[in-house]
Amino acid sequence: MRYRCAAFDIDGTLLDSAPADAAGLHRALAQELGRDVPMDVIFGTFGLPGRDILRALEIPEADAERVMRVWQAEKRARAGWMRLFPGVEGALRALRARGVHLGVVTSKRPKTYALDFVPFGLDDYFDIRITCADTVLHKPHPEPLLKFLERAGAEPSQAVYIGDSVYDRDCARAANVDFALATWGSAHPDMDGATWRLRRPEDLLEIFDT
């Protein structure tokens, strides 16, 4: 088996949360700052931690806490929009059966991880959970993925990182870890630099069967 570890991003990879997340942020920016930010601009920032998203959108630091609070409330109001991508749980189950060491490397805060992801019942598949609270630097810096490797006791060549964004790709590249692009949730399914290009979660099994 080529790899013994697989680390997953969450949003856009395991969880289809972008519509709720983007609509919540769009509403918060309009309500709190009177800004009508195009949705494609908002989507282009996803993959970063929330505070970094606001910085990328040039939100003044003095307004950030208020916007974050309203954004999360608006997102929670749209929680019914969120769902697992089809095939995700079956792929995780099959990887565990093959003895693959699974983890998540996400820009979410621990509280947001608990609210957004844990209710979908996948948390027990993962032995390692790296959130933005576990590192000083965040994606696209390699520190989150390097922290995962440290906890897994693995070399970069023994792991693959599955994600949907350019930030995931750049994090993997900087950590010398192979990157598998989850095209099913990516806003940039044709991006370059992916070791593997996956059409559906089940395609992961082919990687681990080679």
Image (cartoon, rainbow, N blue to C red):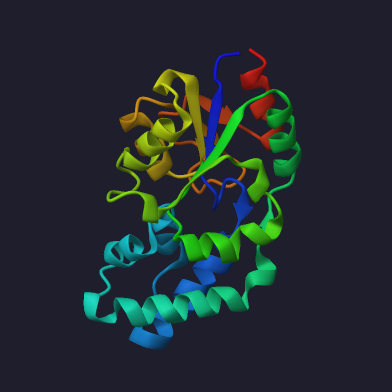
Is residue 133 placed above or below 201 in the rendered structure?
Answer: below
**x, y (%) of residue 150?**
39, 32
Q: Quadrant of residue 46?
A: bottom left
**x, y (%) of residue 115?**
58, 66
Q: Quadrant of residue 91?
A: top right
**x, y (%) of residue 135?**
33, 49
Q: From where the camera sits, is residue 51 visible?
A: yes
Residue found 74% across the figure and 46% down from its top: 86
Residue found 62% across the figure and 74% down from its top: 78
Is residue 56 placed above or below 33 in the rendered structure?
Answer: above
Position of 55 compared to 29: left or right? left
Position of 172 compared to 58: left or right? right
| The N terminus lies in quadrant | top right
Position of 65 compared to 90: left or right? left
- Counting labels gives 0
Residue found 57% across the figure and 62% down from its top: 114
Q: Nearer the viewer, residue 122 or 173?
A: 122
Q: From where the camera sits, is residue 36 visible?
A: no
Q: Nearer the viewer, residue 195 or 210?
A: 210
Q: Nearer the viewer, residue 206 or 97?
A: 97
**x, y (%) of residue 13?**
57, 45
Residue found 44% across the figure and 61% down from its top: 109
| The C terminus lies in quadrant | top right
Is residue 19 placed above or below 132 in the rendered structure?
Answer: below
